[in-house]
């Protein structure tokens, strides 16, 4: 016994020593950062960045390259030399996701050489969140780049202090115009010829006749002394504005302006009440005019012209999403099991589940996206320290300690609601002890221990703010309180892999055997938060382990390397709080998941409908009958027009020359009885301002759980190409004339009119009604297949 205590004490010393070094380095780095912020000036930083800085680029653990990095004159791109890419050696400011101080990226952690933290930083950029790891020659230069890059990122997003929303949107538009102007200026002289403008219009999907283009170009070419026949940037901006006037908004303005090309304060009040469903007073309408009207004369006279009206409807005031839902707006004092929780599956992987890289950076990315339940597959490491990776595959390994450190640093930045760590524990006794020591010493008072809360029900997200919960497998019921150790069974980590992808080393009977590990009660004490320890048959709502999530593996027909995701359908099991999805790559399922959690400030917790948590209420999600205590809704969507729809990134036909042929598809995702999908007609050769003017109607029997998904496609003879999408909860939809801003596309929008009403009787017709007729005509098999297809992955 004494020998065991001595060994445990030695292990604790080793673990704590490495943590002590990390804490000391972090304290020094924080002190230096605070000192640097005192003298750093944004103007000085930008000037230094434009002049260029000599850095070391860390490619991986062993490769380092000297590079000169600088910001271009337009403040739009990070560029570097030398490079084989030539002019393509640049990272747009708009592509930067994060600028991270210190040496905590994967490349730094794997490098044998230790670099000073205050001279290291990483630029995370692109849709794949690629890390550019930099080592500067001095901490002052490093700090200048950190300050300058964060300022430019804020400027791009319109987040600069003291700038109102109208100015923010105008800055974003001006920057976009500057980007396309610079791209079109092949000669680099700051002017565009009519040929360059024509080529640019084609590239951004503007269909305009030669005659119209020449007339508009000539009208915009006002500086004829030195540059006749050429447009500078200001002239080009005026040219673009003149071809961007939208007839559907002009006619709407004329309608409510009683034939005039402007709205008075009283007319704006009437428009908001009649069309937008808003009861706003005159003072609010005056503030709208002051905020959105660019013409000074109109502001003085308190009228809203066509430009101000367009700005207003394109602003947050005219978005489809309810602006109040950008922040937490639900009751957060209910038991934890009353919420859906944003959950991640195989959080540590950057790519596929067989050969990709395991990364601690993924935990940072997932936490910043609003996810609150993370998965760690823990295995014995060869050097005596536990590692995280996908067992029995070729994925790389990352140390458990590094993962925990990253989670501790980023768990509660901008979001104080609790984080749940779902640990798949495959470690032996010795390395489980390290896991327990690391979690206790790193998380400290953030960590929740079993039985810390005495009430029977789970505590609420509000009560657990700033806390970290550990979810592991339950200990056997036979485990006595006075035993030092017991047995915990675990399944093969690759058990979700299809049989044909498993790594086989023996017969099937041997593969199916459960591996057993001895587990110290040190780790058991960190297990799940269980409210009623005395009752082995306690209700699932009092046990985090049984109430938390259903981890969704890839379906049996998917290719693992393609990361196909399961559909997060309505959860029929009342004890489940959510589906764990793959956050590694964007796709339909993840977009649906984002739409679900965006409705409550993207805090990672969404309150379940009342009927899903009350013991006295039950419903059948497969039934087409009305749900008890729920009022069905009729949703009418009039798809009017699109604006600045880009060409697809990955076209079936490659880099084609023609303009796109867009159409809009609208899908309802809810209980099976509500699922429906409909599309508009295709508009040929017009991605700049296509007009559809089509109305579709949907019946929602359980609206509280439904999501509405808008997808824009480019139709091709041999298929279709994805352009963009927007998904949101039905409960977050605003009525009236609204713009849908397609995710990830700065200027691309779809203009719609929305009306919502209570449904009474069977007058409303939707796509689901067509399915009933189909069932009557063709039998139940075809009907079921159609329902499955409506829920399938695109």
Image: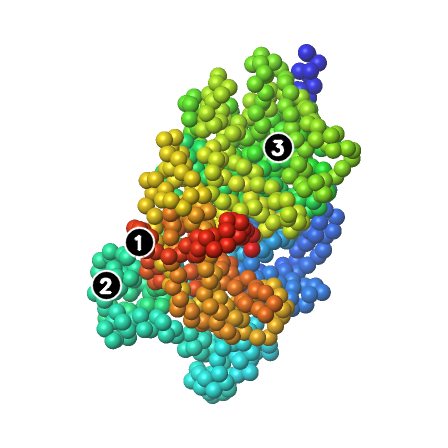
Q: Quadrant of the N terminus?
A: top right
Q: Position of residue 252 (x, y in %)?
A: 31, 70
Q: Position of residue 194 (x, y in %)?
A: 52, 83
Answer yes or no: do the residues labelled 2 and 1 have beta carbons within 8 Å? Answer: no
Which of pointers 2 and 1 indicates the residue nearer the eye? 1
| Quarter residue 49 falls in | bottom right
Task: Compare residues 238 and 750 and report the one nearer the observer.
Answer: 750
| Quarter residue 27 falls in | top right
Determine the CA span between mark 2 and mark 1: 20 Å
571, above or below 5, in the image: below
Mark 2 Cα-neighbour bin, 10 Å: few <14, some 14–19, many ≥20 = some
Which of pointers 3 and 1 indicates the residue nearer the eye? 1
- Determine which residue is flagged by label 1: 757
506, above or below 153, in the image: above
Q: Tag 3, which secondary structure?
A: strand
Q: Quadrant of the C terminus?
A: bottom right
Q: Is residue 788 visible?
A: no
Query: What residue appears at the point 57 percent right and 64 percent down from the top-left corner?
Result: 721
- Determine which residue is flagged by label 3: 424
Query: What residue appears at the point 47 percent right and 77 percent down from the top-left corner?
Result: 236
Q: Position of residue 586 (x, y in %)?
A: 56, 52
Mark 3 Cα-neighbour bin, 10 Å: few <14, some 14–19, many ≥20 = some
- Determine which residue is flagged by label 2: 270
Q: Tag 1, which secondary structure?
A: strand
- Point out the tag, 2 or 1, that comes first from the N-terminus: 2
Determine the CA span between mark 3 and mark 1: 47 Å
Query: What residue appears at the point 60 percent right and 41 percent down from the top-left corner?
Result: 553
Query: What residue appears at the point 51 percent right and 61 percent down from the top-left corner?
Result: 724
Task: Compare residues 294 and 694 and report the one nearer the observer.
Answer: 694
Q: Is residue 646 visible?
A: yes
């Amino acid at each position: 016994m004494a020998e065991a205590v001595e060994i445990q004490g030695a292990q604790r010393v080793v673990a704590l020593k490495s943590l002590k070094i990390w804490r000391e380095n972090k304290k020094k780095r924080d002190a230096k950062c605070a000192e640097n912020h005192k003298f750093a000036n944004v103007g000085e930083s930008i000037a230094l960045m434009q002049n260029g800085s000599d850095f070391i680029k860390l490619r991986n653990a062993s490769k380092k390259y000297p590079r000169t990095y600088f910001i271009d004159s337009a403040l739009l791109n990070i560029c570097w030399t030398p490079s084989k890419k030539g002019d393509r050696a640049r990272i747009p400011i708009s592509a930067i996701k994060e600028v991270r101080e210190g040496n905590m990226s994967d490349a730094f952690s794997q490098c044998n050489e230790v670099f000073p933290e205050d001279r290291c930083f990483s630029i995370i950029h692109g849709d794949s969140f690629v890390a550019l790891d930099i080592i500067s020659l001095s901490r002052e230069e490093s700090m200048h780049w950190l300050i300058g890059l964060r300022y430019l990122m804020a400027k791009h997003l319109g987040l600069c202090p003291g700038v109102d929303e109208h100015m923010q949107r105008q800055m974003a538009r001006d920057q976009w115009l500057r980007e396309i102007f610079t791209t079109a200026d092949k000669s680099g002289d700051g002017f565009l010829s009519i040929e360059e403008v024509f080529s640019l219009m084609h590239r951004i999907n503007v269909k305009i006749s030669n005659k119209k283009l020449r007339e508009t170009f000539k009208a915009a070419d006002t500086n004829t002394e030195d540059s006749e026949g050429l447009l500078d940037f200001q002239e080009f901006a005026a040219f673009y504005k003149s071809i961007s006037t939208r007839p559907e908004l002009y006619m709407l303005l004329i309608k409510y302006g009683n034939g005039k090309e402007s709205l008075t304060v009283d007319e704006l009040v009437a428009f908001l009440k009649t069309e937008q469903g808003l009861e706003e007073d005159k003072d609010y309408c005056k503030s709208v005019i002051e905020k959105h009207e660019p013409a000074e004369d109109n502001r003085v006279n308190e009228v809203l012209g066509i430009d101000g009206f367009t700005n207003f409807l394109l602003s947050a005031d005219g978005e489809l999403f309810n602006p109040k839902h950008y922040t937490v707006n639900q009751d957060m004092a209910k038991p934890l099991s009353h919420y859906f929780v944003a959950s991640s599956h195989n959080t540590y992987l950057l790519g596929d589940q067989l050969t990709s890289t395991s990364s601690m950076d993924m935990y940072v990315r997932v936490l910043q996206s609003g996810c609150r339940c993370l998965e760690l597959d823990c295995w014995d490491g060869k050097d005596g320290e536990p590692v995280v990776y996908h067992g029995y595959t070729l994925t790389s390994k990352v140390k458990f300690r590094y993962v925990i450190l990253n989670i501790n640093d980023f768990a509660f930045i901008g979001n104080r609601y609790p984080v749940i760590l779902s640990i798949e524990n495959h470690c032996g006794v010795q390395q489980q002890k390290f896991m327990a020591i690391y979690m206790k010493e790193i998380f400290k008072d953030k960590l929740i221990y079993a039985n810390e809360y005495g009430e029977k029900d789970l505590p609420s997200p509000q009560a657990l703010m700033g806390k970290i919960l550990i979810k592991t497998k339950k200990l056997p019921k036979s485990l006595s309180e006075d035993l030092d150790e017991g047995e915990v069974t675990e399944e093969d980590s690759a058990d979700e892999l299809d049989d044909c992808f498993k790594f086989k080393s023996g017969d099937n009977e041997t593969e199916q055997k459960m591996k057993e590990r001895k587990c110290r009660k040190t780790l058991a004490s960190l297990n799940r938060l269980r409210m009623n320890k005395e009752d082995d048959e306690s209700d699932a709502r009092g046990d985090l382990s049984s109430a938390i999530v259903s981890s969704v593996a890839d379906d049996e027909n998917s290719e693992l390397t393609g990361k196909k995701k399961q559909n997060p359908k309505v959860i029929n099991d009342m004890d489940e709080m959510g589906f764990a999805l793959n956050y590694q790559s964007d796709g339909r399922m993840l977009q649906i998941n984002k739409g679900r959690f965006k409705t409550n400030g993207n805090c990672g917790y969404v309150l379940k409908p009342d009927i899903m948590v009350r013991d006295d209420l039950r419903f059948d999600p497969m039934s087409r009958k009305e749900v008890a205590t729920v009022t069905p809704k009729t949703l009418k969507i009039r798809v009017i027009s699109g604006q600045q729809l880009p060409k697809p990134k990955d076209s079936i036909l490659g880099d084609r020359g023609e303009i796109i042929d867009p159409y809009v598809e609208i899908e309802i995702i809810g209980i099976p009885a509500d699922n429906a999908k409909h599309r508009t007609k295709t508009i040929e050769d017009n991605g700049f301002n296509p007009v559809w003017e089509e109305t579709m109607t949907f019946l929602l029997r359980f609206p509280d759980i439904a999501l509405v998904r808008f997808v824009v496609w480019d139709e091709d003879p041999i298929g279709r190409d994805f352009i963009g999408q927007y998904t949101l909860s039905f409960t977050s939809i605003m009525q009236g004339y609204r713009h849908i801003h397609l995710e990830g596309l700065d200027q691309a929008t779809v203009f719609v009119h929305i009306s919502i009403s209570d449904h009474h009787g069977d007058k409303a017709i939707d796509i689901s009604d067509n399915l009933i007729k189909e069932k009557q005509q063709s039998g139940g098999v075809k009907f079921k297949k159609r329902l499955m297809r409506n829920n399938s992955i695109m």
